[in-house]
Image (cartoon, rainbow, N blue to C red):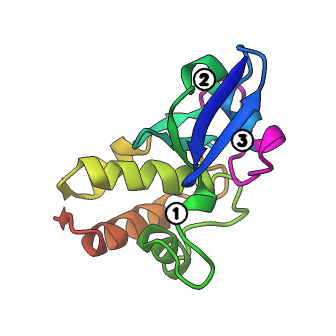
Amino acid sequence: MNVVLTVNGEARALDVAPNTLLVEILRSNLGLTGTHVGCDTSQCGACTVHLNGDAVKACTVLAAQVDGAQITTIEGIGTPDDLHPMQAAFRECHALQCGFCTPGMIMSAIDLVKNSPNLDEAAVRHGLEGNICRCTGYHNIVRAVLTAATQMGSRVS
């Protein structure tokens, strides 16, 4: 099937099987390897991207579902010289170790902040339950999200 979608602001047309997963399109067809495949069962959140502005796990979305869609991946939210506030906060707060979960964690955290005008530690921990990090104790991740939230215009309590 022919799928037309916009990825990180760039229009793309692809010929893929209808049951191709979005994560496969991003990694294999488009070479956007920042979206990671962790579990293939939607448990870990390493493949989280934004689909039409909302965070989704790309391992659960089929090609047939993204025709005409807007996709944003970790590669589309900032540059090395101009990091997104969430990326900068993760760096400043030492919110990563191996980095495998980080892209999905950041994409989920951006969505959480966008949809939560008032955040506290408990809300961040609850909001990121769908993302698993096997290296950290989440403390610095929560700090980073709260730090970025203030920079992104959310209230933090």
Comparing 98 with 48, the one in front is 48
**Kind of residue at badge 2:** Thr
First in residue order: circle 3 vs circle 2: 3
| Structural crowding at the residue carrying mark 2, measured as other residues with C-alpha within 10 Å and reported as few (<14), some (14–19) or many (≥20) | some
Q: Quadrant of residue 81?
A: bottom right
Whole-number angstrom distance, CA of label 3 to CA of label 2: 13 Å
Residue located at (34% from left, 73% from top):
147
For mark 1, what is the residue? Answer: 77
Q: Quadrant of residue 71?
A: top right
First in residue order: circle 2 vs circle 1: 2
Residue located at (74% from left, 32% from top):
14
Comparing 64 with 153, the one in front is 64
Tell me the number on the disc at residue 26.
Answer: 3
**Kind of residue at badge 3:** Leu
The relative height of residue 81 versus residue 91 in the rendered view (above or below) is below
Check contact, mark 3 vs mark 2: CB within 8 A.
no
**Kind of residue at badge 1:** Ile
Residue located at (52% from left, 63% from top):
77
Estimate the x, y position of residue 23 in percent, counting from the top left.
Answer: 70, 35
First in residue order: circle 1 vs circle 3: 3
For mark 2, what is the residue? Answer: 60
Start-end of magenta stretch: 27-43
Comparing 116 with 93, the one in front is 116
Q: Residue 113, can we see it?
A: yes
Number of numbered discs overlaid on the protein picture = 3
SS class of the residue under badge 2?
A: helix
Residue 93 lies within the magenta run: no
